[in-house]
Amino acid sequence: GKAIVNSLSLKEGEAPFLEQAKRVRRYGAAVVVMGFDEQGQAETVEHRLAIARRAHALLTERVGFAPEDIVFDPN
């Protein structure tokens, strides 16, 4: 099996998000991403999708996560 870390969010900004994500990846775990960003909890579908797209890009392009190791919890 694989460990899964619940949860990361962009609530505190990109730098802490990336730092935590790198730590999670170092241990080979998957991650749950919550629907929060610097503006708070997403309240619209558009905002939830924007957060998910941004987090996905950061995790796959900057941290090296496999897409199948990312789970989104839109709240």
Image (spheres, rainbow, N blue to C red):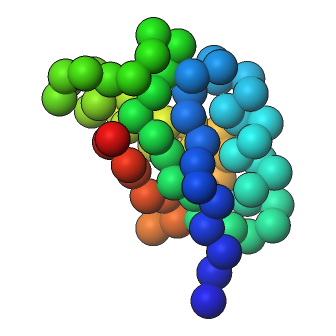
Q: Position of residue 65 (x, y in %)?
A: 60, 57
Seen in the image, is 24 located left or right of residue 31?
A: right
Q: Position of residue 34 (x, y in %)?
A: 46, 40
Seen in the image, is 33 located left or right of residue 31?
A: left
Q: Quadrant of residue 15?
A: top right
| The C terminus sits in image quarter | top left
Which residue is pictured at 67% across the width and 32% down the height?
17
Q: Compare residues 30 and 53 and report the one nearer the observer.
A: 30
Q: Is residue 64 above or below residue 20?
A: below
Q: Position of residue 27 (x, y in %)?
A: 81, 67
Which residue is pictured at 65% across the width and 19% down the height?
12
Which residue is pictured at 75% across the width and 42% down the height?
20
Q: Is residue 60 visible?
A: no
Which residue is pictured at 39% across the width and 23% down the height?
41
Residue farthest to the bottom? 1
Seen in the image, is 75 located left or right of residue 61?
A: left
Q: Compare residues 9 and 56 and report the one nearer the observer.
A: 9
Q: Compare residues 75 and 24 and report the one nearer the observer.
A: 75
| The N terminus sits in image quarter | bottom right
